[in-house]
Amino acid sequence: MSKRYTITAALPYTNGPIHIGHLAGVYVPADIYARYLRLTGNDVAFICGSDEHGVPITIKAKKEGVSPQDIVDKYHAIIKKSFEDFGISLDNYSRTTAKIHHETASEFFTTLYNKGEFIEEVTEQLYDEEANQFLADRFVIGTCPKCGNEESYGDQCEKCGTSHNATDLINPKSAITGNVPTLKQTKHWFLPLDKHEAFLKEWILKGHKKDWKPNVYGQVKSWIDDGLRPRAVTRDLDWGIPVPLPDADGKVLYVWFDAPIGYISATKEWAEREGKDWEPYWKDEDTKLVHFIGKDNIVFHCIIFPAMLKAEGSYILPDNVPANEFLNLEGNKLSTSKNWAVWLPEYLEDFPNQQDVLRYALTANAPETKDNDFTWKDFQARNNNELVAIFGNFINRVVVLTNKYYNGKVPEPIEFSQIDEETLAAVKAYPAVISSSIERYRFREASQELMNLARLGNKYLADEEPWKVIKEDEARTQTIMFVTLQIASALATLSEPFLPFTSDKLIGILNFENNTWNEVSSKDFLLPAGHQIGQAELLFSKIEDETIQKQLDKLEASKKANEAANKTIEPQKEEITFDDFTKLDMRVGTILEAEKMPKAKKLLILKVDTGIDVRTIVSGIAESFTPEEVVGKKVTVLVNLAPRALRGVESQGMILMTETPEGKLVFVNPDDANVNNGLHIS
């Protein structure tokens, strides 16, 4: 029976492009779910949009010397195009600077205000005297009062996920000037979450929400158990939706009050464009509302937004909030500020027409219950060993053999053996198996069940060997190939939520109109005898080591550039006198021999001609230079440094080295190669 669903995907901040962490955490699982629901005949509104207010936007604008509107216009266009190119099947992608959103958010605030749902309070807020402004949210950084993270923002700690007020921070500093802020009085409006605590306990803890993911339920329970407190819904900022009250000049709606209302305004915008009524998608109890988010947004979607909806009184509440954990990259936390990320626009450029490879790799390794790590080697293995070797290989063999034996026509089956019957029955069972995983938000598990269907096809082909059987029994071969074509057509349909571009291509090769999800299990046969299919095309291509190395090199270059940009210049050491300096005896020398110190990663043992003698010097340069590279080099040597034993070898001096801005170790050496050894440097 058809059901109505409103599916929301977290609104991305328009202060940068989308990266793989966003995709794995929110957008790929949400898209799989929406596509699956459409295939099963449901009425779906899949909604998202750009979150264009809040402090990160203004910080980005200040850094780039442009207006906040310039920033959001730029990144809204980039994000929207990336989603379209990547196949995220949104019914509407809106933006919070849109007129319809400003109107909807203002109306929502006014309704709650008129119902007496806010507390108006004058409180002390952090203030930067030099910048002459209040420090809302990410304009202030300090130590998290819960986990001790020294880089927590004023509204939330990204390390432990705790949401708090800026005044809760220990040792707060202004993100604008670096100054220690003062406290200054200001008036704001608060949503009294404590007033809704009993409702939230009943709805979540005593209700049916134990089917929520353990990470979601646990975090929400912890919040409620700690006791809820009023939360400000306004801010002292000049960028955002003005508070719709006469005595609120210079104040805007808090971004986490305004942003979730963006789901509602985006639905209104979509419904108006499509000639639909938006209200059933948000106000009909028969509608199922599902929020796809990352774990850092749990409190806003499970406590604050439901409290807002309940206070307003006419909206449905979320049925589920399947939040994912975080995705790391090559062993390190994804970081936009450090450019440690795989950006979607760059991926689409570097891997044209390979959207499904990334979709599959992210789904097969989804951070559903714990933080997971994306590596380029795993990405390559998922493509080569699974998509190419299992899925693509099966389809290619079936299509090639059908064209070779029957000129591309589905053969008439003659008689089904027991293995044929069992295989066809197994195929019919897969929709229910995959559905069970998807409906429990286990998309990783569902993707592997899809791959198991391809494995079933490969095993059936390998066991039945039609290329051998055709020499002896043409009738049996017809039946074998008929069965393999049913598996192929089932894959075409069931892969659509996970691999939409592959599904489209496979449907084209098989030359049929796609079946619905339920038809895969209910139809006797998906491809009838006599149906004409097309020619074979490769669904996936092998990804070579060189391609992966380029991506690893790009990350390494990004890492080094970031280290260089953030490298602090060491402060000047205490003053010395001229007499102190004259005690240093530095001379030109030549390295005559070099070898690695046994069992030492960083040390080279050098024989150096200093002009006054040939001496042994142990130098920590083995990670930057091979012994062969340094032999014959002119170097600067501090010859009167007291000898020192290093791993049993006496070092009789020091080679002078420095680092380039990129962090590369280089010799401090005389430019003229003709300078004689032993010459004093002064």
Image (spheres, helix red, strand yellow):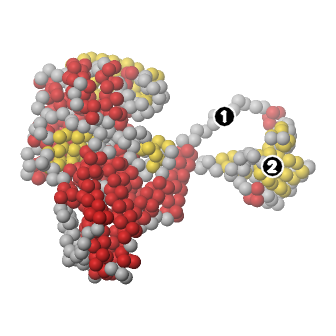
The residue lying at 71 percent from left, 47 percent from top is 601
- Circle 2 crowding by C-alpha within 10 Å: few under 14, some 14–19, many from 20: many
Q: Which of marks 1 and 2 is in front?
A: 2
The residue lying at 37 percent from left, 42 percent from top is 368
Residues marked 1 and 2 touching at CB (< 8 Å): no
- 285 vs 342, left or right, is left
Looking at the rendered structure, the number of numbered marks drawn on it comes to 2
User: Along the polypeptide, which appears first: circle 1 or circle 2?
Assistant: 1
* Residue type at the position of mark 2: Ile
Q: Position of residue 61 (x, y in %)?
A: 36, 42
Let me know if residue 330 appears in the view: yes
Mark 1, residue position:
572
The residue lying at 21 percent from left, 36 percent from top is 319
Q: Which mark is residue 605?
A: 2
Q: Where is residue 346 in the image (x, y as percent from the top left)?
A: 40, 57
> Is residue 272 or residue 565 the one in the foreground?
272
* Residue type at the position of mark 1: Gln
Q: Where is residue 125 in the image (x, y as percent from the top left)?
A: 34, 21
Quadrant of the drawing holding the C terminus: top right
Q: In which quarter of the image is residue 473?
A: bottom left
- Circle 1 crowding by C-alpha within 10 Å: few under 14, some 14–19, many from 20: few
Secondary structure beneath dot 1 equals: loop
> Is residue 441 or residue 627 the one in the foreground?
441
Q: How far apart are marks 1 and 2 (CA)?
A: 31 Å
Q: Position of residue 36 (x, y in %)?
A: 23, 52
Let me know if residue 355 appears in the view: no
Secondary structure beneath dot 2 equals: strand
Task: Judge whether 672 appears above or below 462 on screen.
Answer: above
